[in-house]
Amino acid sequence: MVDADYALEARGIIKVFGNHVALDNVDFGLRAGEIHALLGENGAGKSTLIKILTGAYQPTTGQVLADGVPVAVDNPQQAQKHGIGTVYQEVNLLPNRSVAENLFLGHQPTRFGLVDRRKMERDSRDILERYGLDIDPASELGAHSVAVQQIVAIARAVELSGKVLILDEPTASLDRNEVERLFEIMRDLRAKGLAIVFITHFLDQVFAVADRVTILRNGKRIETRALDDVTRTDVVRLMLGKDVAFSGATGVQDARPLGEVLLDFRNYGRKRSVHPFTLSIHKGEVVGVAGLLGSGRTEMARIMFGADAADEGEVHFEGKPVSIARPTDAISKGFGFCPEDRKAEGIFGDLSVRENIIIALQGKLGWFSALNRDEQMEIAGKFGEAMDIRAASLDMPIKLLSGGNQQKVILSRWLATDPAFLILDEPTRGIDVGAHAEIVRTINRLRDEGLALVVISSELDEVVAYSSRIVVMRDREMVAELSGKDINPGVIVQAIANHKEGTAS
Amino acid sequence: MMRRILGQLANPQLLALAGVLLINWLLFPNFFRITWQDGRLFGSLIDVLNRGAPVAILAIGMVGVIATKGVDLSVGAVMAMAGAVAATLVVAGYPAPIAVAAALTVGLLCGLWNGFLVAVLDIQPIVATLVLMVAGRGIAQLITQGFIVTFNDPVLIFIGTGSFLGLPMAAVIAIVLLVIVTLLVRKTALGLFIEAVGVNRAAASLAGIRSRMLLLYVYGLSGLCAAIAGIIVAGDIRGADANNAGLWLELDAILAVVIGGTSLLGGRFSVPLAVVGAIIIQAMNTGILVSGFPPEFNLIVKAGLIFLVLIIQSPLAGRLFPARLRPVQEARK
Amino acid sequence: MSIITKLALAASLATALSSAALAQDISGKVVGFSQIGSESGWRAAETSVTRQEAEARGVDLKFADAQQKQENQIKAIRGFIAQGVDAILVAPVVATGWDEVLTEAKEAEIPVVLLDRGVDAPEDLYLTSVASDQVEEGRVAGQWLVDTVGAEDCKVVELQGTVGSTPAINRKQGFEEAIAGHDNITIARSQTGDFTRSKGKEVMEGFIKAENGGADICAVYAHNDDMAVGAIQAIKDAGLKPGTDILVVSIDAVPDIFTAIAAGEANATVELTPNMAGPAFDVLAAYWADGTEPEKFIITESKLYTSADDPAGEYERRKDLGY
């Protein structure tokens, strides 16, 4: 029974929050001397699993075993005792203390009951040398780059724990050289027998450094495989959960002629957010945006709408160069934006459905041309009906509506402004089937009415069904623009996975 | 229509006010007696309006700030500054209109300064306005050089103690402000935008609301209201008392807004109900004065009553006594 | 207690009378003065009077403002000791924590005189303390009322200072002592006006409503003049004549109350003298001259002022002292 191969193992983990099953009977085994990538879209259960391994959560049922022995990990301190150390994306050290203090915080060497600073700094220098860092241990941690801080965090975790190292998106804010340096350290630690869990959104990095991969989707473990046995395409397919290669769906009827160019982004980009991209958007077309989470899809949408200002390139609207530095600039030209995080950036929870619908139109009209209650009711009623919003009353707070109906309200909000261009970021995520169909229907209808749309979605079948072109994002870069026959899930998956087959441009 | 009006009268704030007035009447049967004297109304009820006016005016400014999920702790200090400026100028021989205009300008600038810290520098409102809360009183003391600047200017005294149509001037000013600000926020889209920013500033920005401008205006209005209250208080005692004018009144104003049903988490707000909140607080104060309780009990009695008022309008009470129809949750299939 | 008070009063009066003669004796002396701050008008006046008194005697006064902090006062006193001053005046901000620095002064043989507040330290560490008697102030105010109303019934309303503050407790006690045994005088209502003008006015408005529009009130006793000034406005607003319909007696003798007395709107005030330094310099002069050890507690006079005491002149004398 006991598989002593595993330095750390989770067996049959089920974790339930309320009536939501976050992890459903997940097994996860970690060998000494391997780098094990943990992959999955947001909400797949990666962070829940990590939190159970590190003692931040307790599993509803299931066991955690260290070296084949069941252990109770009640808190992160105990996890440390079992040799498990974690480094998060946001370095959680103390930037205003010295490097040495950060390395030894909580277990400083003492002499006569006092912190032995000299010994601490001497030891720190030894440790830092092992990680190839030539920095002064007495210097303030915050004065160093994120990469150095990241390495200090790893050094601390390894020194404290020494057996298992969990890296949660450690590369998210590093540049290429820094990532390479981090990989060297990871390989080094692997050679010393450490078991490393590596969580990332970047497939390239997984294939560059990891030995095995475990893929989670919707709280279930889909697969654990040695990376030698799988292709990128396989991995993407497993992550997205559609057997896409065999899906026959092809893109929209290429018969329809494209309308004239509405928008033209030329080398448009923003540092540290999205690489410059060039893209024309025509009236009467849907441009689908595909890519894994963290690939820069949302960032692209945000600079298109002015939610973040672009710092490179230019944009032409109806042939004329324009500046879109904030949302009001975009809205005045007829843009609309349904953000990905509905709750945090979309809805006004305490305000009524009616107010949620008319707010963008009112913003466009300004303060002094206030819509009176009857006008608001009429507008809200019209769009409520057109979008089939199911609410007991238009005066009830929107937070009481289901996710799908909230999404319809936000879509109505923009339709009320009579837009020319809509950006929809994951418009169908997390909503029920009925609302989903309604939104897809609406996207098709708007396209036919001559609107230009950019739709970001992880649902490949769906994007394929309504897009006339698809751009693919990877590593914050627009890497492909697909049209015609290339609009099919197989080609998209390959483009996301960076295979050179197909006609990625 | 009739039912709607009755429904609105049955809100917890007005019930609480009625309750406090009833207690006052039980303790002091002459509480409601109003006489006509020297061309003005005279009685405890009028005192409540007159004395409640400064806090009501502060609350009119404060309610917008709180609706945006902020708070303005500086209003008491701004009152002291405005009073000090007005008093010092009239004593120095400037005509009253100039003194009043200068005091209002000082209040407005203070408010805009707070708005700048909150909206542009993104400092938390409680910290941002704390700066002026501390510094403002110090500035007021510098202006008055530490003593009460007594004046005899008839215009300033009229603002503080005069009467119009029999009502105390302070109450008249509060009512006029209430009407203007209520119309301003409800007849324009300002109120909706304030609520939108308070509920979700990120979503408001994406929906095309200029939230920074809005915050500047809201804090500016709060500063302006504080200056008006400061001039009234100075006019009332014919002097600017930098040490004591408006002391702790920011807390009364916040309390008035909260009693008026506006959440400190921002969102839905009501200017008239905030004013009702201020009147409830003053009705308690006046009730304590006429009841003859020893002063040692003042704070306890006040705290107890406020506790009761807050319980009456808590969500739990709303569930126990479903006086108004609650929104029906959408039936799911 | 009362014997000590009288003795002390007599002593201070005696020294006050002889102060002119002694003034020449101490010119050129250097005296350090550690003041609490300038939190009230009276405090500011005390500072100006101390400077005037020093100047009149030719004393070189070193002034240090502690801004309400004891540590600043201790620093200032150590500074004075280091400079080798001839004496130190301290208005202590709190009562405790003085033993060490006072011992240092004693070892340096520098006499220390405490002004207007006492400290919890051994008596031999300082020369003397000069302070007013707050109970006596209340007593003088009460006695004035007793003498004024005679045998007539008189309902008094009282405007207390801040609840729980020492002057509020003492001034209330003194007043009650003075009217005890005069059953025609009763305190009908008593509320706090927080020592401020606006609260004084507000509370008085309430009292007037509660007492039959003010018709039942014979007198108002305010624990300080600021509240009395507010109360006078409330009485006027109610259509009554302050000083005639309702007698007004208060404590402190700040300039604004003399304006009211001159106008007949207030009747009496009891002085809390800002001149603590005068008696202090007098005992210092005697001490320097022949080592005379003064009484440990010198009580300043609680002088009563009415319309008979040239209120307009008193106003002029006080208006520039910083009240």
Image: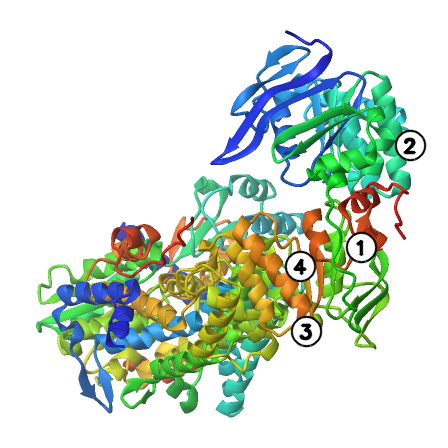
Circle 4 sits in a helix, a strand or a loop, which is it?
Answer: strand
Q: CA distance from mark 3 to mark 1?
A: 22 Å
Pair 3/2: label in front = 3
Residue located 26% across and 83% down the image? C236
- What residue appears at the point 40 percent right and 81 percent down from the top-left corner? B179
Do pointers 3 and 2 mark residues of a single chain? yes
Q: Mark 1 or mark 4, which is nearer the start of the sequence?
A: 4
Measure the alpha-carbon separation of dots 2 and 1.
43 Å
- Is disc 2 in the same subunit as disc 4? yes
- What residue is rendered at 59% in x and 76% in y? B109
Chain bearing mark 4: A
- Badge 4 amino acid: Leu
Mark 3 neighbour class, 10 Å CA radius: few under 14, some 14 to 19, many 20 or more: some
Circle 3: residue type:
Gly
- Which residue lies under the disc numbered 3? A334
Q: Residue at x 8, y 63 (%)?
A: C183
> Residue A304 location, x and y as percent?
75, 63
Amino acid at the residue labelled 2: Asp
Left or right of residue C303, residue A223 in this image: right
If the image is split into quadrants, where does the N terminus of chain B sit?
bottom left
Sequence-wise, the earlier of marks 4 and 3 is 3
Q: Is residue B60 above or below residue C245?
A: above
Q: CA distance from mark 2 to mark 4?
A: 47 Å
**Residue B281 placement: quadrant:** bottom left
Q: Which residue is mark 4?
A: A424
CA distance for labels 4 and 3: 14 Å
N-terminal-most mark, 2 or 1: 2
- The disc label shown at residue A471, or none: 1
Position of B31 compared to A372: left or right? left
Closest to the observer: B180 or A491? A491
